[in-house]
């Protein structure tokens, strides 16, 4: 049992950290916490079978923290996402304006008019007086955020279609827009 736990524990913790750090949505993050919980149980078993009380107690505490993470991401947050998705679907079936949860925009693909990906949305700025989206911050190039370029795209240039935002220009054209620094975004 100890040998299996020694094998499972570091693999589970490593995979869980990668899954959680990827920030791919509530359900995936929640799965990361499930995997963290498995790792905590495995490390507890290692501590129990080797007489390492500190390792056991540390992983008892981590077990409860991970259970909280499972509830937070697979329970609470997933239910909130489902509520937003249901409202979006119902609004699309109705006669009024379609609604989209604001949280959906972060991480959404930015495509040109024919559906080819030209970047991704990292955030959006909302006007506090009128409640309208002013601009989106689009990311182009790079891998997992390293080496990317950020560019402002005015909201009036974008259209929502098939789960992505559409922009009437290519990735090359988007890349020629002025770059936005990570820590200095346009204020208007």
Image (cartoon, rainbow, N blue to C red):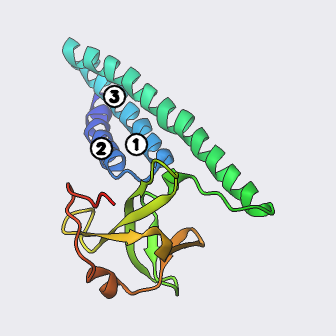
Q: How many marks?
A: 3
**Position of 67 relative to 154 (above/below):** above
Q: Residue furthest front?
A: 129
Q: Position of residue 168 (x, y in %)?
A: 47, 85
Mark 2 or 3, nearer chain start? 2
Q: Position of residue 164 (x, y in %)?
A: 52, 70
Quick one: 157 or 15, which is closer to the camera?
A: 157
Circle on res. 40 = 3
Which residue is identified by label 1? 32
Element type where label 2 sits in the image? helix
Mark 2 or 1, nearer chain start? 2
Q: Are marks 2 and 1 in contact (CB under 8 Å)?
A: yes
- Cα–Cα gap, marks 2 and 1: 7 Å
Q: Position of residue 31 (x, y in %)?
A: 46, 43
Element type where label 1 sits in the image? helix
Q: Quadrant of residue 65?
A: top left
Quick one: 123 or 69, which is closer to the camera?
A: 123
In the image, what residue occupies the spot 27% across and 62% down? Answer: 144
**Position of 49 relative to 148 (above/below):** above
Element type where label 3 sits in the image? helix
Quick one: 102 or 4, which is closer to the camera?
A: 102
Which residue is identified by label 2? 17
Residue 24 relative to residue 102: left or right: left
Circle on res. 100 = none
Mark 1 or 3, nearer chain start? 1
In the image, what residue occupies the spot 32% across and 24% down? Answer: 62
Residue 43 visible: yes
**Position of 158 relative to 89 (above/below):** below
Residue 164 relative to residue 83: left or right: left
Q: Quadrant of residue 42?
A: top left
In the image, what residue occupies the spot 50% across and 77% down? Answer: 166
């Amino acid at each position: 049992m100890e040998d299996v736990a020694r094998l499972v524990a570091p693999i589970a913790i490593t995979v869980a950290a990668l899954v959680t750090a990827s920030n791919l949505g509530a359900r995936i993050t929640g799965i990361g916490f499930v995997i963290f919980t498995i790792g905590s149980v495995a490390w507890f078993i290692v501590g129990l079978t080797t007489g390492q009380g500190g390792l056991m107690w540390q992983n008892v505490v981590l077990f409860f923290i991970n259970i909280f993470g499972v509830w937070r991401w697979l329970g609470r947050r997933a239910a909130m996402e489902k509520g937003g998705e249901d409202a979006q679907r119902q609004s699309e079936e109705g006669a009024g304006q379609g609604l989209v949860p604001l949280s959906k925009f972060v991480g959404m693909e930015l495509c040109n008019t024919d559906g080819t990906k030209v970047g991704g949305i990292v955030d959006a700025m909302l006007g506090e007086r009128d409640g309208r989206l002013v601009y989106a911050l689009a990311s182009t190039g790079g891998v997992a955020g390293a080496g990317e370029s950020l560019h402002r795209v005015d909201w009036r240039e974008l259209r929502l279609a098939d789960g992505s935002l559409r922009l009437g220009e290519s990735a090359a054209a988007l890349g020629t827009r002025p770059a936005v620094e990570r820590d200095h975004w346009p204020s208007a």
